[in-house]
């Protein structure tokens, strides 16, 4: 039974890249993601890109706590309309360079493309890891200078699950900071309100580690059912527990695999089990 899978590869500020998606038609079992670059090849590619990258110095607009160990980072691009306009598709990313840090970091853009053109800002969700460039970034203040590369990547090819009437079911799976590009996808709009079944399974250790909780009502009103899944909930939690793949297995309920799209973004173990 075929299903359409959105996946794309990008790298974060720290630890290995999270698997994401570019739409492909695949058998429902497995949901293979074959866009991961081997670590050596990725390192070589990154080195080549650094030689040709055009860097734009700009400033931090704000850094706020988004959840436990996660920070909402907003960067001002209002003086660089060409850079702002280059973000055209959810799922794209860029490189960020900090002062006195040799290697740049890769960040998925969390905000929808419309925000950059309307408000002159790129927004990111960054996990702070001790001793990493991410920790340094999250410790900056408003007005501090960073450098951004041009926007990179093809992002999510939403055309492959259009029109919504032909793909009434879209299943979205994210864990931890993997929710970052998913926010961009949801807030960019992909006809969720014209589909009969759009579910976001969002996994984290506990509720304190769930980012964007203040946006869930807005996402629900746009047609996306948000299903938080906690692997280590406290005793008061009455929602889904365990791992996102298990929560999906309990729910299943796919009426038409041929009319189903899937988006995966998060820990490699999750994407492997969802094969």
Image: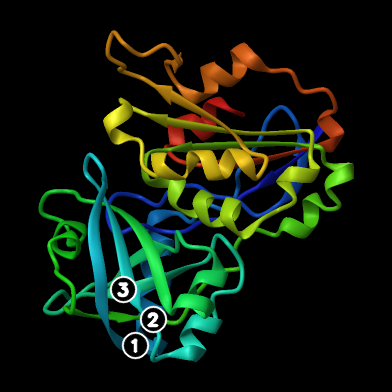
**SS category of the residue bearing label 1:** loop
- Confirm or deny contact between disc 2 and disc 1 (CB under 8 A): yes
Instruction: Indicate the position of residue 177 as horizontal and vertical percent values.
Output: 37, 45
Give the residue at x 75% y 50%.
191
User: Which class describes the residues within 10 Å of circle 1: few (<14), some (14-19), or many (20+)?
Assistant: some
Outermost residue to the top: 235
Looking at the picture, does residue 152 appear above or below residue 136? below
- Residue 44 in the image: state x and y as whole percent: 38, 70
Q: Tag 1 or tag 2, which sits nearer the N-term?
A: 1
- Number of marks drawn: 3
Dots 2, 3 in contact, CB < 8 A: yes
* Quadrant showing the N terminus: top right
The Cα–Cα distance between marks 2 and 1, rounded to whole angstroms, is: 5 Å
Q: Secondary structure at mark 3?
A: strand
Label number found at residue 55: 1
| Foreground pick, 270 / 196 | 196
Label whose residue precedes the other's in the sequence (2 or 3):
3
Residue 149 badge: 2
Residue 67 in the image, given as x and y percentages of width and height: 27, 42
Mark 2 → mark 3, Cα distance in angstroms: 6 Å
Few, some or many C-alpha atoms within 10 Å of disc 3 (few <14, some 14-19, many ≥20)? Answer: many
In the rendered image, which quarter is residue 5 located in?
top right
Residue at 45%, 54% (x, y): give it.
38
Q: Please indicate, yes or no, whether residue 1 appears anywhere in the rendered image.
A: no
């Amino acid at each position: 039974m075929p299903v359409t899978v959105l996946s794309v590869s990008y790298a974060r500020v720290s630890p290995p890249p999270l698997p994401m998606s570019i739409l492909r038609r695949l058998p429902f079992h497995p949901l293979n993601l074959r866009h991961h670059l081997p670590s050596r090849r990725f390192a070589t590619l990154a080195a080549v890109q650094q030689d040709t990258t055009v860097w734009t110095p700009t400033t931090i607009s704000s850094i706020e706590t988004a959840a436990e160990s996660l920070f909402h980072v907003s960067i001002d691009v209002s003086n660089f309309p060409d850079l702002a306009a280059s973000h055209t598709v959810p799922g794209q990313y860029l490189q960020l360079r900090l002062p006195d840090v040799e290697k740049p970091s890769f960040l998925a853009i969390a905000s929808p493309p419309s925000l950059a053109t309307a408000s002159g800002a790129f927004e990111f969700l960054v996990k702070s890891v001790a001793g990493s460039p991410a920790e340094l970034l999250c410790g900056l203040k408003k007005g501090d200078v960073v450098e951004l590369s041009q926007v990179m990547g093809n992002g999510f090819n939403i055309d492959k699950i259009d029109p919504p009437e032909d793909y009434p079911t879209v299943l979205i799976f994210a864990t931890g900071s993997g929710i970052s590009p998913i926010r961009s996808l949801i807030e960019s709009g992909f006809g969720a309100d014209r589909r009969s079944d759009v579910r976001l399974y969002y996994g984290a250790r506990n509720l304190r580690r769930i980012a964007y909780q203040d946006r869930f009502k807005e996402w629900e009103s746009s047609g996306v059912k948000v299903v938080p899944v906690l692997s280590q909930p406290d005793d008061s939690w009455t929602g889904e527990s365990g791992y996102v793949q298990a929560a999906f297995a309990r729910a299943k309920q796919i009426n038409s695999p041929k009319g189903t799209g899937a988006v995966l973004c998060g820990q490699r173990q999750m994407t492997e089990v969802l094969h």
